[in-house]
Image: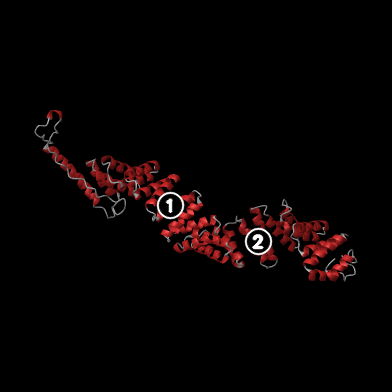
């Protein structure tokens, strides 16, 4: 029938004309019953039965290679042959093959079992077919038992071993499947497909090193294996070998350039490598090939933003949130891009709105609270700014340098709110975190001076001058030109005068 389920060419011999058993001279006939000779009418009837059954059978076989092959009409021909002659071995076999092609699994199994009852020594290949039938019916225990029965007579039959390995793998018998695949590879080390299956089995069970080794062996045998390149790339990602992963994904892309899942993975690994141009190319290619825009557009926007293509990034992210308004990360990045666009108050308002949406979707993001605080400060909305900045540091580790930016902004906003003590405390937090700039020290110096703390003031000014001598010595000298200055409390201190003269208090 043109494939593995095609009708066999086993032939049922013509009906034998039974001859009466003639005992040789001297035989003891009393102890052995003589077969009864068949009557001519019985012989004639058997011949007619054979001819009628064979006629139906041949009609079925004549459909091989036609559009009726594997169809119900062909099956009916074989059934009629069996109805006439129930022990018609080949008719049962061919009917079983038709049922296999029709996915009538249990019917196929019944016919193949009948063949084996009639002829236990039938060709070993039938056990693989019987395994297919039971597998299709969902009975993996019987499927495996059938194939193992076949292997009992031909233990090194590669076809049966491959069928067994497949059944074991699909039914979760992983240890048995690994052993079977190992036998296959031992018999045929050039079998790339079995090495690939063994690699998949190792991968399934998190035996990463073993899986990598088998994929590499499989690629030595078949460099054009998409599955080996792709899965090896996934494993290299797990092993934190992004360059190797990218190499395998690139090789897989050449084999299946339209594979959207692969393109997305390639974009991910290029992003990890900070190769944003290549990442954007992969994501855009996936989108052009009908990839999921709700998932791909945010990634494309991120890559474009990091590649400095802000306008294109905004366009991608705006499409992303239009498709999925619940994507907090996309709103967060949009807020950043709007804030950095330099388009004035409108851009700030757009950024504020985007950040608020991100926070509503995922509350407690301290980085967003910090950004909101900065934007409110730019709009001179200082109470609102302080509230957001306090959220940014609320509950945080006082020793975490990651909070320094928030404390620095709290200090500046507190100054705008005339909260000297709050500003001093915030600047001192920045200093304690080890992230203070010359500007922080300068502001501390001013605040200490303003609050009659000359010694700490001069210490802070000295640090500012140390970090940026030209700028802050000039600023202090300019301030001293004022008749009434905030520096009046320190201007006549010798240490301060020495600082302005030499930079050393």
Q: Which residue is under mark 2?
A: 335
Residue 212 x %, y %:
48, 55
Is label 1 in a helix, a strand or a loop?
Answer: helix
Q: What x and y, as percent, mark residue 309?
A: 60, 68
Q: Residue furthest top?
A: 30
Residue at image coords 22%, 41%: 85
Judging depth in this view, the residue of 232 and 358 nearest the camera is: 232
Q: Is residue 49 above or below residue 273?
A: above
User: What is the residue that sits farthest to the left in this orientation?
Assistant: 25
Q: Which residue is mark 1?
A: 197
Asked where in the image residue 16 lies, by quadrant, the reply is: top left
- The residue depicted at 88 percent of the width and 68 percent of the height is 497
- Mark 2 and mark 1: Cα distance apart in space: 47 Å
**Quarter holding residue 122:** top left
Q: Is 438 left or right of 158, judged from the image as shown?
A: right
Query: Residue 462 at x, y = what percent?
Result: 82, 65
The relative height of residue 129 versus residue 435 in the rendered view (above or below) is above
Q: Position of residue 300 (x, y in %)?
A: 57, 62
Answer yes or no: is residue 172 visible: no
Q: Secondary structure at mark 2?
A: helix
Nearest-to-viewer mark from 2 and 1: 1
The numbered mark at residue 158 is: none
**Along the horizontal axis of the image, is 431 left or right of 84?**
right
Q: Could one spot residue 404 in this view of the protein?
A: yes
Q: How is the image coloured?
A: secondary structure
Circle 1 residues within 10 Å: few <14, some 14–19, many ≥20? many
Do tag 2 and tag 1 residues touch (Cβ < 8 Å)?
no
Locate residue 324: give its quadrant: bottom right
Quadrant assignment for the C terminus? bottom right
Residue situated in front as seen by the camera: 50 or 56: 50
Above or below 400: residue 24? above
The residue under the point 48% across, 49% down is: 204
């Amino acid at each position: 029938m043109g494939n593995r389920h095609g009708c066999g060419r086993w032939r049922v011999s013509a009906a034998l004309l039974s001859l009466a058993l003639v005992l040789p001279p001297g035989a003891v006939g009393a102890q052995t019953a003589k077969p009864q000779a068949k009557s001519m009418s019985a012989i004639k009837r058997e011949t007619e039965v054979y001819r009628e059954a064979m006629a139906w059978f041949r009609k079925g076989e004549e459909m091989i290679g036609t559009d009726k092959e594997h169809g119900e009409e062909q099956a009916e021909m074989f059934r009629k042959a069996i109805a006439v002659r129930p022990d018609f071995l080949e008719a049962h076999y061919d009917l079983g093959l038709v049922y296999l092609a029709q996915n009538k699994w249990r019917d196929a199994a019944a016919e193949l079992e009948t063949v084996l009852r009639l002829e236990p020594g039938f060709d070993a290949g039938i056990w693989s077919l019987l395994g297919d039938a039971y597998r299709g019916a969902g009975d993996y225990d019987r499927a495996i038992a059938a194939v193992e029965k076949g292997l009992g007579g031909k233990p090194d039959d590669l076809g049966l071993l491959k069928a067994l390995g497949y059944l074991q793998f699909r039914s979760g018998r992983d240890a048995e499947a690994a052993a079977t695949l190992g036998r296959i590879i031992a018999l045929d080390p050039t079998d790339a497909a079995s090495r690939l299956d063994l690699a998949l089995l190792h991968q399934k069970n998190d035996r990463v090193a073993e899986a990598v080794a088998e994929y590499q062996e499989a690629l030595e045998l078949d460099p054009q294996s998409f599955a080996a390149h792709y899965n090896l790339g996934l494993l290299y990602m797990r092993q934190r070998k992004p360059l190797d992963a990218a190499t395998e994904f690139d090789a897989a892309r050449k084999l299946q350039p339209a594979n959207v899942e692969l393109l997305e993975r390639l974009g991910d690994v290029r992003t990890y490598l900070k190769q944003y141009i290549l990442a954007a190319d992969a994501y855009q290619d996936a989108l052009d090939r009908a990839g999921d825009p709700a998932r791909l557009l945010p990634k494309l926007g991120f890559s474009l933003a990091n590649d400095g293509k802000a306008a294109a990034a905004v366009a991608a992210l705006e499409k992303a949130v239009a498709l999925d308004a619940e994507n907090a990360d996309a709103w967060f990045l949009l807020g950043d891009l709007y804030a950095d666009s330099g388009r004035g108050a409108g851009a700030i308002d757009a950024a504020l709105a985007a950040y608020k949406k991100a926070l509503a979707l995922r509350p407690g993001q301290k980085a967003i609270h910090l950004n909101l605080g900065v934007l409110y400060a730019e709009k001179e909305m200082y109470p609102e700014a302080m509230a957001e900045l306090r959220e940014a540091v609320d509950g945080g580790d006082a020793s975490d340098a990651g909070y320094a930016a928030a404390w620095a902004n709290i200090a500046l906003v507190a100054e705008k709110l005339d909260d000297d003590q709050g500003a001093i405390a915030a600047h001192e937090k920045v200093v304690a975190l080890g992230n203070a700039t010359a500007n922080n020290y300068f502001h501390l110096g001013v605040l200490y001076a303003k609050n009659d703390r000359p010694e700490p003031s001069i210490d802070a000014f000295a640090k500012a001058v140390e970090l940026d001598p030209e700028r802050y010595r000039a600023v202090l000298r300019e301030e001293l030109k004022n008749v009434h200055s905030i520096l009046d409390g320190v201007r006549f201190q010798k240490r301060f005068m020495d600082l302005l003269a030499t930079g050393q208090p």
